[in-house]
Amino acid sequence: MRSLLLLPVLFALAFSHSHDKSLDWWETTIFYQIYPRSFKDSDGDGIGDLNGITSSLEYLKELGVGATWLSPIFKSPMYDFGYDIADFYAIQEEYGTMEDFENLMAKAKELDIKIVLDFVPNHTSNESVWFEEALRGHEKYYDYFIWEDGVVDENGVMHPPNNWVSVFRKSAWEYREEVGKYYFHQFVIGQPDLNYRNPAVVEEMKNIIRFWLDKGVAGFRVDAIAHLFEVDKADFGGKLPDEPLSGRTDDPDSYDYLTHIYTTDLDETLDMVYQWREVFDEYKEKDGLTRVMMTEAYSSPQMTMRYFGEGERKGAQMPFNFVLISDVNGESSAAEIKYALDKFLTFKPIDEHANWVAGNHDNNRVASRFSPELVDGINMIIMLMPGIAVTYMGEEIGMVDGYVSWEDTVDPSGCNTDDPINYWMASRDPERTPFQWNAEKNAGFSTADKTWLPVAADYENLNVAVQRESENTHLNVYKFLADLRTEKVFRYGRYESVAFNEGVFAFRRWYQRKAYIVVVNFRNEPYTIDLTYFEGVNRSVKVVVSSIQSPKTSRDVLSANKVEIVGNESLVLKVV
Ligand code: GLC
Ligand code: MG
């Protein structure tokens, strides 16, 4: 009798005694992106700040998040809201002081939340001491930047050195009288590109990494990495060559006008990423903590994978996977979703992890790009697909793009359109509106009379406080998913996906004897699907969590061969 009772236990032991690799902190955590300017304002000036973040860290804990990456907090004139850094070693005053930063680090440590900072290596601010010294003719700093002579035409008029265009429109060259030359800027005029062919720049930037690692940060998100190097003019007879026309638009001011073969994705850029990883690893050598690098490049999958490393050389642990931003949206069919999601998994090196990014401060929100009904479905995907989850603040409650009038628009990408009608298509302000904490003034973000960007209109009904209070909310779905993904099946389990029809995308995760199926209906139409398509699914499946508009509730048991899915419904099902 006794031995019979023991049998299942032994059976379970035999199965669990597998070769589960022990996983490092970054391999299992959720990275939550905070845009500091819009998260929480502690001093009532209408601008989010470090003390605001410190006082809100418990919220991250509540979500089940173990790490946060912060958009830039460094000294900046804010032409590109902190991505134009005037002093890489100092905190922007309106965000706080170095002491505030240290308090943030201490509080994060207490809560076991890792802090990752934004490293912006491609450019500085034109108000940095480096650039100002360069203008004064200080040779050391002159060589920190990229200077070229203009081209004078037959009428004696001077033009930029070549046809290169800024990501934010118009020529990427700006003339400076003091120097009598043009400097190169891939982004706004206030963001002169650094010259990485100068070893002094390379060393300086490594020192910046060391400075913040010494302060205890757990890694960096690396900004705009594809743009780091431009071709060497020595290889082109001493003159930087024009880029070829793309044929995609006739607007010569548009970044899309050219194919960027000389200014993006160069081999030298990858080498620099590998050099930075060596710096990260020196720190790991010392204290055992892995410093994580995430790289931002909207590149081809082949190129993206090179950021992981090549041969013996290691690079980023997380080259961002942007398929959910660049490849699909609410119009996409289930097949297109499957095709996009399989991409990273198909191309990635076998020993590396995928990562899933559905939003950030540069792209419209999930509720706006897909639909408010698909918020839970997208969260199910980023949290339960194999790999690392990344969430942009507010996506856990389904925040919607805010309306920002032309008058209130501050993002250079919007302003540079000079177009009071269509600016909103280029502006990134809508996804940067203040975080919605509660139904009070300014959504609880700030006590100021005017916040730096207006609060989105629907905040009284869409905020953390409201979603904490009732059971059936995006926030609770998110927390449930954060908890669910700690199960072994989501850490180690295999993956298989299918598009059942035009609307329904589904995937199975399984490990040992456990299996789950995630179903997301991308169309606002009902379908009946047969889940016995999946191996191991025979009679029934049990609902563990469903999207908030779903008529199903958790613990509902469904006949697997005939599951009725309503429009835009998303489900996590356990195979029973
Ligand atoms: C990255 C940032 C973006 C910034 C740009 C220039 O794409 O995410 O916000 O404008 O780099 O630094
Ligand atoms: Mg403030």
Image (cartoon, rainbow, N blue to C red):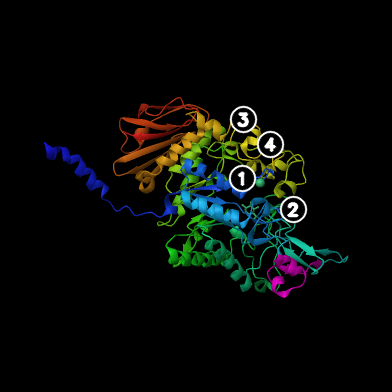
Q: Which mark is residue 363?
A: 1
Percent of width and height locating residue 149 = 77, 69
Nearest to the eye among marks 4 and 1: give it.
4
| Residue 187 picture quarter | bottom right
Q: Secondary structure at mark 4?
A: loop
Nearest to N terminus: mark 4 or mark 3: 4
Q: Could you say which is closer to the camera, residue 196 or residue 5?
A: 5
What residue is shown at x 63% (from left), y 35% (from top)? 443
**Residue farthest to the top, as pictured:** 551
Measure how far apart labels 2 and 4 are at the Cα level: 26 Å
Can you identify the residue that label 3 sits on? 460
Dot 4: few (<14), some (14–19), or many (≥20) neighbours within 10 Å? some
Mark found first going from the N terminus, 2 or 4: 2
At x 66%, y 34%, the residue is 441
Per the model, the C-alpha gap separating discs 4 and 1 is 14 Å
Give the CA distance from mark 1 to mark 2.
21 Å
Extreme residue toward the right, this view: 155
Discs 2/4, front? 4
Please say whether residue 9 is visible from this viewpoint.
Answer: yes
